[in-house]
């Protein structure tokens, strides 16, 4: 049946039952993607790193509109705003139960080009997206222990050579043909729109439906490589494990996916140049500048810079030398560009850390002392930064010792709260994250992820 806002609460038990009975879940948020807005290059570049792409997708622009109204109109608008916020809050809290039920099930969640779907779902129904990519990966695998992106699956062997177009509509059509064997599905009575003959594309529910069909067809095709062949491959089969927790990266030339369970691919980019030039330049100017180097690919960064990839890496030094005496443009290798960005980031971090070292001891003593007298708690994270980039160390304290012990698993979070008078109790988001981690480890055999990956199919480390 169709679940909408008006009948959600009365049918929530049916949703729970469906989650319990399902073999896997297919999702689609019908988000507009990364091509909306006045400038596509503001959100995507062919040589983005996974960290850069995550930061671009996470960033939201906000606009403030100022208008003058009388007192009566102001009160009316405030009431409307409050009513709308309350309605949105009720809806969010209600649907978050479904997300938590899916997370608790530990079952496979499938999507097509699903990075944005996952980011929006985590942000709206779990907790705000973290600033750091590695923290996002950890949080995501806690909420959704097993994810599978059908666009990546279709772009990988053994499907890569027999599927030319991986857009959802074209993929669904291709998987109806030989050598694939599409599943036979009967639409529920009264819901004719969920019939592939009607092609209700770009409706979130329908897109999720055909995403599930595409997964079944591709999974069953993998069974044909077994001896003896199998006509049906379940969502728990080891044959599909190599595709787990790898999300397709749209429009990145040499990094096809975001790896949620480990480090991302680091391709060699010794054929790539970073070019800066006047704002008036167009694509034709860049082609003219590099006309002597044969075929090139251009990926715009902003109005005054772009990446240019050459077909032959040995031509890179020659291209760099051409800009030594140029006044209007500058060319540098990709390695030099990344190195300078890293230096700038380290200098900025060092400046921030030095500032904290000067200010924090006095601030720590004052706040901790006054808060202890009032029987309040001070947030432990303001004392020590524990990001993957580096740590901001202060003088040794019980708080730091507790945090280190908790990181190594020597003491529990409850014990830490009891021993550190300046520590704030763990936020609900972090507690949920830890709880889901434990659940992920304790999944039943039918829903667990084996340590040994299937060797028959591999998502390659280099593309």
Image (tube, grey):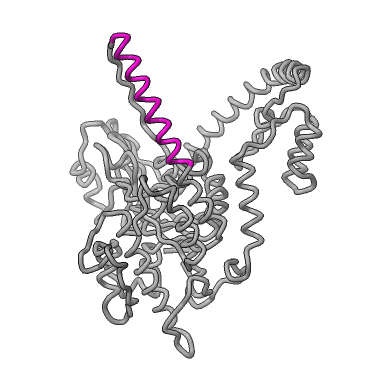
User: In the image, is 418 to the left or to the right of 333?
Assistant: right
Q: Is residue 421 above or below residue 318?
A: above
Q: Is residue 264 above or below residue 80?
A: below
The residue under the point 69% across, 25% down is: 378
Q: Main SS of the magenta segment? A: helix
Quadrant placement of the N terminus: bottom left
The residue under the point 45% across, 57% down is: 15
State which region is magenta: 70-93
Relative image position of residue 315 (x, y in whole percent): 34, 53
Q: Quadrant of residue 450?
A: bottom right
The residue under the point 57% across, 30% down is: 349
User: In the image, is 91 to the left or to the right of 347?
Assistant: left
Seen as rendered, the residue at the extreme front is 10
Quadrant placement of the C terminus: bottom left
Q: Is residue 41 above or below residue 112?
A: above
Seen as rendered, the residue at the extreme top is 70
User: In the image, is 26 to the left or to the right of 263?
Assistant: left
Residue placed most toward the observer, 259 or 377: 377
The residue under the point 55% across, 54% down is: 141
The answer to whether any part of residue 378 appears in the image is: yes
Residue placed most toward the observer, 81 or 276: 81
Seen as rendered, the residue at the extreme bottom is 228
Q: Quadrant of residue 367?
A: top right
Relative image position of residue 226 (x, y in whole percent): 47, 85
Relative image position of residue 369 (x, y in whole percent): 77, 18
Q: Is residue 158 magenta?
A: no
Q: Quadrant of residue 161?
A: bottom left
Relative image position of residue 289 (x, y in whole percent): 23, 44
């Amino acid at each position: 049946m169709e679940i909408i806002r008006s009948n959600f609460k009365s049918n929530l038990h049916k949703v729970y039952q469906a989650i319990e009975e399902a073999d896997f879940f297919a999702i689609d948020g019908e988000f507009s993607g990364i091509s909306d807005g006045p400038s596509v290059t503001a959100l995507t570049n062919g040589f983005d790193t996974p960290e850069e792409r995550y930061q671009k997708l996470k960033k939201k622009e906000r606009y403030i509109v100022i208008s003058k109204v009388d007192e009566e109109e102001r009160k009316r608008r405030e009431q409307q705003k409050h009513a709308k916020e309350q309605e949105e809050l009720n809806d969010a809290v209600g649907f978050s139960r479904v997300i938590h039920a899916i997370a608790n099930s530990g079952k496979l969640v499938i999507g097509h080009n699903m990075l944005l779907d996952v980011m929006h779902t985590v942000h709206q129904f779990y907790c705000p997206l973290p600033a750091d990519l590695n923290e996002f990966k950890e949080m995501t695998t806690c909420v959704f222990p097993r994810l599978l992106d059908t666009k990546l699956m279709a772009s990988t062997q053994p499907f890569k050579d027999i599927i030319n177009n991986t857009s959802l509509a074209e993929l669904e059509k291709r998987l109806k043909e030989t050598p694939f064997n599409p599943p036979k599905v009967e639409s529920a009575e009264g819901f004719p729109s969920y019939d592939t003959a009607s092609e209700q594309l770009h409706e979130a529910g329908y897109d999720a439906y055909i995403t599930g069909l595409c997964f079944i067809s591709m999974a069953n095709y993998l069974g044909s490589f077994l001896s003896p062949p199998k006509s049906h491959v379940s969502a728990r089969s080891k044959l599909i494990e190599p595709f787990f927790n790898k999300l397709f990266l749209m429009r990145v030339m040499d990094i096809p996916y975001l790896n949620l369970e480990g480090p991302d691919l680091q391709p060699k980019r010794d054929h790539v140049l970073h070019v800066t030039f006047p704002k008036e330049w167009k694509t034709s100017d860049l082609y003219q500048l590099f006309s002597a180097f044969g075929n090139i690919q251009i990926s715009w960064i902003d109005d005054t810079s772009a990446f240019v990839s050459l077909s032959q890496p040995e031509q890179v030094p020659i291209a760099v030398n051409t800009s030594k005496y140029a006044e209007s443009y500058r060319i540098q290798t990709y390695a030099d560009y990344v190195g300078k960005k890293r230096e700038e980031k380290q200098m900025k971090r060092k400046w921030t850390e030095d500032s904290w070292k000067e200010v924090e001891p006095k601030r720590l003593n004052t706040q901790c002392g006054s808060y202890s007298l009032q029987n309040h708690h001070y947030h432990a994270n303001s004392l020590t930064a524990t990001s993957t980039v580096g740590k901001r160390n202060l003088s040794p304290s019980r708080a730091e010792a507790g945090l280190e012990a908790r990181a190594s698993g020597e003491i529990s979070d409850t014990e830490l709260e009891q021993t550190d008078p300046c520590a704030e109790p763990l936020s609900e988001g972090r507690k949920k994250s830890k709880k889901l981690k434990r659940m992920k480890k304790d999944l039943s055999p039918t829903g667990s992820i084996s340590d040994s990956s299937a060797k028959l199919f591999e998502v390659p480390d280099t593309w």
